[in-house]
Image (tube, rainbow, N blue to C red):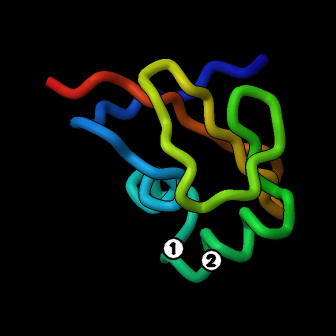
Amino acid sequence: MPTYETIPVRGVIRLGQFLKLTGLVEDGATATIAIQSGDVLVNGAVEQRRGAQLAAGDVVEIDLPTGREGAVVGEGI
């Protein structure tokens, strides 16, 4: 498994927001398309709910034309 950057977040964050925060997608519309297409994995499982709540330690991956990229949800300061 690749090592991804840990992105600190405060409180609850939803999948679509996290994808935008990390820069894995440009905007909410792109996040929605990627999620609904089954291109987004959370902890290795396909997640198709844009509003899915993430917790510290969750690994979010997305299949892009350039390959799979991702980030880890970290605890905020």
- When asked about the image quadrant of residue 9, the answer is top left
In the drawing, does residue 59 fall left or right of residue 57?
A: right
SS under mark 2: helix
Give 7 or 33, whichever is nearer the viewer. Answer: 33
In the drawing, does residue 33 fall left or right of residue 6?
A: right
SS under mark 1: loop
Q: Quadrant of the C terminus?
A: top left
Q: Position of residue 28 (x, y in %)?
A: 50, 76
Mark 2–mark 1 contact, CB under 8 Å?
A: yes
- When asked about the image quadrant of residue 2, the answer is top right
Q: Is residue 40 above or below residue 12?
A: below
Badge 1: how crowded within 10 Å, few (<14), some, or many (20+)? few
* Residue placed under numbered mark 2 in the picture: 30
Marks 2, 1: nearer the viewer: 2
Q: Is residue 29 above or below residue 12?
A: below
Residue type at numbered disc 2: Thr
* Label of residue 57 in the image: none
Q: What residue is rendered at 56% in x and 26% in y?
A: 58
The span from disc 2 to disc 1 (Cα, nearest Å) is 6 Å
Q: Position of residue 37 (x, y in %)?
A: 85, 68
Residue type at numbered disc 1: Glu
* Label of residue 26 in the image: 1
Badge 2: how crowded within 10 Å, few (<14), some, or many (20+)? some
